[in-house]
Amino acid sequence: MMKVKSGVVLLLSAMSCLVMSFPSMAATKIGSISLEINSNISAGDYGGDVDVDTDSSKYYVDDVQVTNEPKNGWEDNDKPKIKVTLIADDDYYFPSTLSKSDVDLSGDDGTVTSISRRNNDEMYVNITLDALDGDDDDDDSDYDLYISDLEWDDADGTASWEEADDARKYEVRLYRDGSSVTSVQTTSNTYYRFASYFTKSGDYTFKVRAVYNSSNKGSWYESEELDVSSSEARDIRENSSSSDYGSSTAGGPGNNSQSSGAWLHDDIGGWWYCNADRSYPVNQWQYINDYWYFFNEKGYMVTGWVLWNNIWYYCSDSGAMLTNTTTPDGYRVGADGAWIQ
């Protein structure tokens, strides 16, 4: 029988601990965390949900728990507390140097109170939401924010719904096969065109809720599924026009004007845009269906980073320029889409 000296055993044990304590040499450190919060908790409710999402490809939201739900219902000035569990994707890890100041929140207002790691792959973020605003002196807290008749236009990817009596605006979000495709979008219309996000086959749904103000939001309502094949997704994009759908991007890198035309695709360079006069954009930005797109010197839509007038912008996989968010590789862009250095 082979014997091993005690010193060798200790060395092997120490090496094993080192392997377990440190991420793979190929793993990339996550330097910041970006979360979008949408709370459906209101004063007077029992229970209530909080939806937390991220646009990052480095990690995903695994679980959201409300940790201080009262037995007798939520009251005015209560501050809901949530615990968000994040899981790092393959080839990424959460370093011990991350602090709560590295967490950026958007959507409903809240404050990061603490963060902690279970290991390199799992992190907890504790957030306290702003105080609930119940009845006020004008007794105007009872708003009709009910939404009905959610419908799809399968020709151009337009989501529509009936107006809620007291809604000042609406929040809407697109899903494919149960996973979110977009962040929460805001519009004052009772429709939103998602044509540019129909990039592949799948079962598409959208959720929408009516908003009176930040403290008075209705329930989320979900549409029926729209089953789309790859060719049908292409047709939806091609049928996209310049009607006034969605919410306009604030600022941008070019001339902020809508374009009338159609998306086309070929096997040479991918997607390109044909204007109404049969011209097409070349080496320039163009504002189409409320989003900025960049087209290269051959007229094809560009994804990823774009350097324009010494400023960096990022275009998503759909081609739409990102604004007010964190890019998939971890950089922040502002309301005009420019990289915040």
Image (cartoon, rainbow, N blue to C red):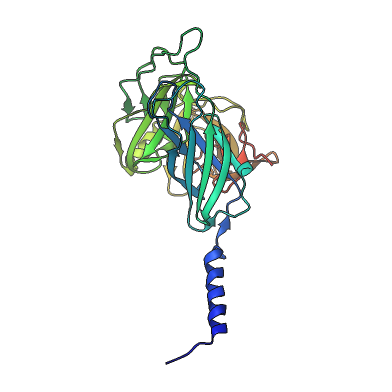
As drawn, 158 above or below 296: above
Residue 6, can we see it? yes
As drawn, 163 above or below 51: above
Please identify the residue farthest to the front as the structure is shown: 71
As drawn, 329 above or below 221: below
Q: Nearer the viewer, residue 156 or 194?
A: 194
Please tell me in which quadrant of the rendered image residue 191 appears.
Answer: top left
Name the quarter where the C terminus is drawn: top right
Q: Residue 90 location, x and y as percent?
A: 48, 57
Which residue is depicted at the point 62% across and 28% down? 251
Q: Nearer the viewer, residue 326 or 200?
A: 326
As drawn, 121 above or below 238: below
Residue 269, can we see it? no
Q: Residue 202 location, x and y as percent?
A: 33, 42
Q: How many marks are shown on the rendered structure?
A: 0
Q: Nearer the viewer, residue 187 or 31?
A: 31
Which residue is depicted at the point 65% across and 40% down? 339
Please identify the residue farthest to the top as the structure is shown: 138
Please tell me in which quadrant of the rendered image residue 157 appears.
Answer: top left
Which residue is depicted at the point 53% across and 40% down? 126
98 displayed left or right of 263: right
Q: Residue 308 location, x and y as percent?
A: 66, 40
279 displayed left or right of 97: left
Name the quarter where the N terminus is drawn: bottom left
Q: Residue 212 location, x and y as percent?
A: 47, 17
